[in-house]
Image (cartoon, rainbow, N blue to C red):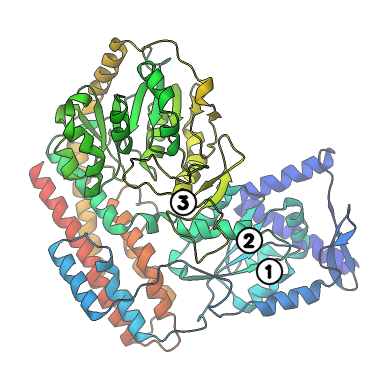
């Protein structure tokens, strides 16, 4: 027994030291649990027992054993159940596509005639090559990333690690006390010497989503196929939520070719001297500090509460997302500011109402992303149009904000501009809980979905059409889609950190709950004072005073630095040679390092584009090269194709920057 006591004491001490050093938030949770137990605020549910050479967990109240005193048998079965086959317990982080010769030729022509138009132009050659050179397989060559849903005492974790030797593990456990017991019986610190560990212990949905993203972003070229093991005693909820996170990866939602357009389009508007909103702009001036600002997004609750809005329209400063202005116009509600984010030409549909009746918007100011399409910018009055940066950092003093959707961006905007009283309407980020509609009736992309939980059926899960439940604003649970959930997650994760003590946010919408907001129904929300015209005039003057039309010398020098960096990376790519004895992991790491430095991503927009491109394609390359029968000739062939695609992106970027520097 002394030897067992020594083992568990050593395990616990090594684990605690490791967790304290590398996982501080988890350490704080464990410390809080210890303090709660010591002070009598928490009564322990479990007891660690050791009988007949086996550990077990006794649930005190029920006098029930977690492993039924058969831990070794359970561990053996768990280990045997984990295999390298691709037909079970597998997450795939890619969309299956095939390309015939005709399609490849069409895509090549598209890229030559209209660069950046089709993302498939840049990925099809690589995917096609890997598909034609490999046979459909039933087993993985290696398991590089692995997830444990449920730790129990962790014996299966150590045993499975010995079998598969993955490079990274996501370890999920909802019960903090149970996880603490595993620190006595499982040496996580030893596993961490050979693998990167990510812990999701006692986390809510927002925290779990963030941890899952960190796991996925770590050496993302290993993401091609992720195996997992689910303890029967652990809820399936986190496995389902991981699937949603996998679906919501930013670089699979907004692709590299679109991001390249987003970072290049602002250069055109800088050369045309559009007004740039400065980050010095604030809405908490003495004149505005008590004024209520209302965001109108295009969720179902905007339509459901239109009579309330009509009655209060003159008592609010209205910030309308661009997709809602047609609906507002129909009900004679004039927005003070229209906010737009979408960089695609199709977004002209949101501004058709403006084209038809520009006088209705004669006092409206337009806040447009610097990546907004030309067909929209050309119809707006330039003197009342202001651009902000979203995804780029060209002007040091410019307002720069970003969010997954324009509704959440409007919310972020008012937080950053320090509006004190913010009201949200139509920012449902969920479907109507009676009709299943995801937007107002006249929204250009409105869908009516069947109200049922489809999260448990991966075959049915669709990014914009499948439904699952999350916490609601007025209801306990509401149905949302993976598409909406991406915005909900960002709002709950980051926006409370932006909120100042003096800022009050009231959520009038009927959809998702947002942290830091106060749910408030419109019937209980009354405004007595009509906003004087002078207040609106002061607002417009304030905006104008905090706008600029030029890039200064420092900004232009930054452009030159970015151009020089792009040329350097192009030179490095051209000089790279495949070694005599190549290795798949080393190749992926080397190519990644040529373009992506974590410290540079915030400054060099090109690095962010290539990072996004790699997120999409590099795991295909690694998975192909990781096979046992791959030769150096295969490396040379795949690198030649990848190099051509990278040079295409690099040359497009370099040419655009050189042209802009001539125009400025």
Q: Is residue 221 above or below residue 30?
A: below
Residue 603: mark in rendering:
none
Residue 157: mark in rendering:
1
The image position of residue 296, as x and y in percent, is: 38, 31
Task: Please state if 573 lies on the left or on the right of 526 as rendered.
Answer: left
Q: Calculate the distance from the C-alpha at mark 2 to the C-alpha at mark 3.
A: 34 Å
The mark nearer the N terminus, 3 or 1, is: 1
Q: Calculate the distance from the C-alpha at mark 1 to the C-alpha at mark 2.
A: 9 Å
Dot 2 falls on a residue whose secondary structure is strand
- Residue nearest the observer in this picture, 385 or 376: 376
Observer-side mark, 3 or 1, equals 3
Residue 110 in sight: yes
Residue 171: mark in rendering:
2
Q: How crowded is mark 3: few (under 14 residues within 10 Å), some or many (20 or more)?
A: some
Dot 1 falls on a residue whose secondary structure is helix
The mark nearer the N terminus, 2 or 3, is: 2
The mark nearer the N terminus, 1 or 2, is: 1
Residue 263 in sight: no
Q: Residue at x 31, y 87 (%)?
A: 633
Report the label total.
3
- Residue nearest the observer in this picture, 421 or 299: 299
């Amino acid at each position: 027994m002394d030897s067992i006591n020594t083992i568990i004491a050593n395990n616990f001490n090594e684990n605690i030291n490791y967790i304290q050093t590398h996982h501080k938030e988890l350490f704080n949770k464990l410390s809080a649990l210890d303090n709660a137990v010591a002070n009598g605020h928490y009564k322990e549910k479990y007891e660690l027992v050791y009988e007949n050479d086996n550990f077990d967990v006794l649930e005190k109240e029920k006098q029930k054993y977690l492993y039924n005193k058969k831990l070794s048998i359970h561990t053996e079965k768990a280990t045997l159940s984990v295999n390298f086959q691709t037909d079970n317990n597998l997450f795939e982080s890619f969309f299956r596509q095939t390309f015939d010769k005709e399609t490849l030729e069409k895509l090549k022509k598209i890229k030559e005639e209209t660069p950046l138009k089709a993302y498939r132009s840049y990925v099809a050659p690589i995917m096609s090559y890997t598909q034609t050179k490999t046979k459909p397989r039933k087993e993985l060559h290696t398991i590089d990333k692995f997830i444990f849903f449920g730790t129990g005492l962790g014996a299966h974790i150590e045993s499975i690690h010995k079998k598969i030797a993955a490079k990274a593990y996501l370890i999920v456990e909802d019960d903090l006390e149970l996880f603490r017991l595993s620190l006595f019986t499982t040496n996580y610190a030893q596993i961490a010497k050979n693998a990167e560990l990510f812990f999701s212990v006692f986390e809510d949905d927002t925290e779990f989503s963030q941890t899952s993203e960190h796991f996925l972003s770590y050496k993302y070229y290993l993401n091609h196929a992720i195996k997992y093991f689910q303890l029967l005693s652990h809820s399936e909820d986190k496995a389902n939520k991981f699937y949603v996170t996998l679906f919501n990866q930013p670089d699979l939602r907004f692709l590299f070719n679109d991001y390249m357009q987003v970072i290049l389009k602002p250069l055109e508007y800088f050369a045309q001297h559009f007004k740039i909103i400065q980050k010095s702009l604030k809405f908490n001036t003495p004149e505005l500090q008590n004024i209520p600002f209302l965001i109108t997004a295009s969720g179902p609750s905007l339509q459901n509460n239109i009579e309330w809005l009509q009655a209060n329209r003159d008592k609010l400063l209205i910030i309308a997302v661009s997709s809602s202005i047609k609906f507002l116009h129909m009900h004679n509600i004039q927005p003070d500011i229209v906010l737009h984010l979408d960089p695609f030409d199709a977004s002209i549909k949101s501004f058709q109402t403006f084209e038809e009746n520009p006088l209705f918007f004669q006092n409206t100011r337009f806040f447009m992303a610097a990546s907004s399409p030309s067909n929209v910018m050309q119809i707006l009055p330039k003197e009342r149009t202001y651009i902000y940066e979203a995804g780029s950092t060209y002007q040091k003093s410019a307002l720069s904000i970003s969010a997954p959707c324009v509704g959440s961006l409007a919310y972020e905007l008012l937080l950053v501009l320090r509006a004190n009283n913010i009201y949200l309407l139509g920012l449902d980020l969920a479907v109507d809980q009676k009709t299943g509609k995801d937007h107002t009736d006249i929204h250009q992309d409105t869908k009516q979905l069947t109200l049922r939980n489809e999260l448990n059926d991966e075959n049915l899960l669709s990014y914009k059409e499948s439904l699952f439940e999350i916490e609601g604003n007025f209801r306990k649970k509401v149905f949302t889609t993976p598409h909406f959930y991406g915005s909900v997650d960002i709002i709950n994760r980051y926006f409370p950190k932006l909120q100042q003590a003096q800022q009050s946010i009231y959520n009038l919408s009927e959809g998702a709950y947002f942290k830091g907001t106060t749910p408030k129904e419109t019937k209980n929300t009354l405004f007595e004072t009509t906003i004087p015209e002078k207040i609106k005039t002061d607002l417009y003057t304030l905006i104008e005073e905090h706008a600029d039309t030029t890039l200064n010398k420092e900004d232009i020098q930054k452009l030159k630095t970015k151009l020089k960096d792009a040329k350097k990376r192009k030179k490095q790519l051209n000089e790279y040679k495949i070694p005599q004895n190549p290795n798949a992991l080393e190749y992926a790491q080397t190519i990644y390092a040529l373009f992506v430095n974590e410290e540079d991503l915030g400054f060099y927009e090109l690095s962010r584009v290539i990072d996004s491109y790699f997120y999409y394609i590099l795991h295909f390359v690694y998975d192909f090269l990781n096979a046992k029968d791959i030769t150096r000739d295969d490396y040379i062939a795949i690198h030649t194709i990848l190099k051509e695609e990278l040079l295409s992106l690099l040359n497009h970027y370099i040419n655009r920057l050189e042209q802009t520097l001539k125009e400025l």
